Amino acid sequence: MKLKQILILSLLLSPLNAVAESTPEPLSRLIESYKQATPVKRVPPKYPRSKVKRGQDGWVQLSFVIDEEGKVKDVVPIDHGGSGLFVKSAIRAVEQWQYEPATANGEAIEQCSNSVQLDFSLGNGAVVGKRFNSLFRKAQKASDEKDYQELSTIIEQMDALKSLNRTELFWRNFTSITLHRGLQQPKKTYLAVKRTLASSSVLETIRQGKDIIPMLLKEKFIYEAENELYAKALNTFKSIEKQVPSLVQNFQPFVEQINEIVKSDRLIAIDAEKSESGVWIHELARNQFAFNNLEGDIHKLEVRCDRKRSVFTFDINSSWQIPESWGQCTVFVDTANNTKFTLVEMNS
């Protein structure tokens, strides 16, 4: 992807509403003394025996809560690559983790916004099998010829192998980016980009790694900014600062515009799409939100923040305002199949 593509954002992120100035608080006033939870014990996940025999690798991303006793609870799978058995093993492991609990003003509190990625690797991930290599070469040819029907068939054949190691899993996800981009499926392209990044630990053994990461992060940031996923876009920018500092200057103006939008009175509307885990997850850029255009049923609404969480009853006519003291928040929505809705973020 060429860097000039980010110019699309200049059309999306303007005009901006003016934000009124306020008198600053005295800098010396102590509001709260806060200490994050620190790990005491982390049990590694058990590798499923059937996957050891197949030589299959994978990864799992989880969200979880650390309670006032430092125990982990309410583990929610966010995404995974490879077998679903990895998800079960990862959850069982994380549920056994122990932390020194977070504290506020010396008192133990829940730390509710925690996430982790657990990688399952047998250590032979740099070797690509003959069958996969043959399929990958065919995929490259189909991509060059823009034969997306053939490319889709090849990806299905890759998935049918059911024994992909970490390198093969990376290139399978990378190939799916080309497929969905060619079919003009932006949401699926974005998901493929995220999963390729989740598999990117293998890039240390791949010569093209230094060129692939910047491309993936740029494409991820662009999608998030264009689709008003502003909290995610700002987090992606932090990854750009850390991994590709040479790009920071190019993205800084757009980050400043995103921050101005978040402060403004402009509504931020996000159309929901249920994830494979059965829970729709959205990181809030603001602390007030409501729902609109509901088609179907919402079973459960939970908000997990840095320092607090709450489970709410749902009413389409209600709005929810989260105290700023709770910190950065993420909404978890458990819905029935085929339920559609729009989450609207607003400022008070």
Image: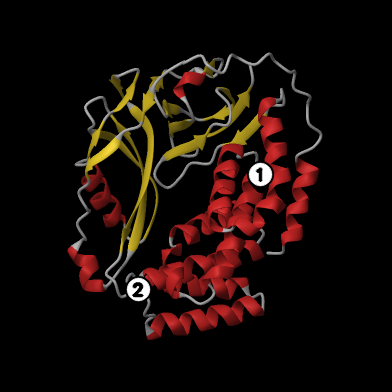
In which quadrant of the rendered view does residue 264 lie?
top right
Numbered-mark total:
2
In-image side of 120 versus 146 (left or right): left
Observer-nearest residue: 271 or 249?
249
Please give the residue where the numbered disc 2 appears in the rendered image: 125
Q: Residue at x 63, y 23 (%)?
A: 346
Amino acid type at image mark 1: Ala
- Label 2 secondary element: loop
Q: Which is nearer the N-term, disc 1 or disc 2?
A: 2
Residue at image mark 1:
225
Q: Position of residue 263 (x, y in %)?
A: 67, 26
| Amino acid type, label 2 | Gly
Q: Quadrant of the C terminus?
A: top right
The answer to whether one can see residue 339 in this image is no
174 vs 49, left or right, is right
Q: Name the residue at 22% across, 33% down.
A: 71
Distance, label 1 to label 2, CA atoms, is 34 Å
Find residue 18 and report its image quarter. Answer: top right
Local crowd at mark 2 within 10 Å, few (<14), some, or many (≥20)? many
Q: Residue 50 at what x, y percent from top left?
A: 20, 66
Query: Quick one: 238 or 11, which is closer to the camera?
Result: 238
Q: Nearer the viewer, residue 191 or 6?
A: 6
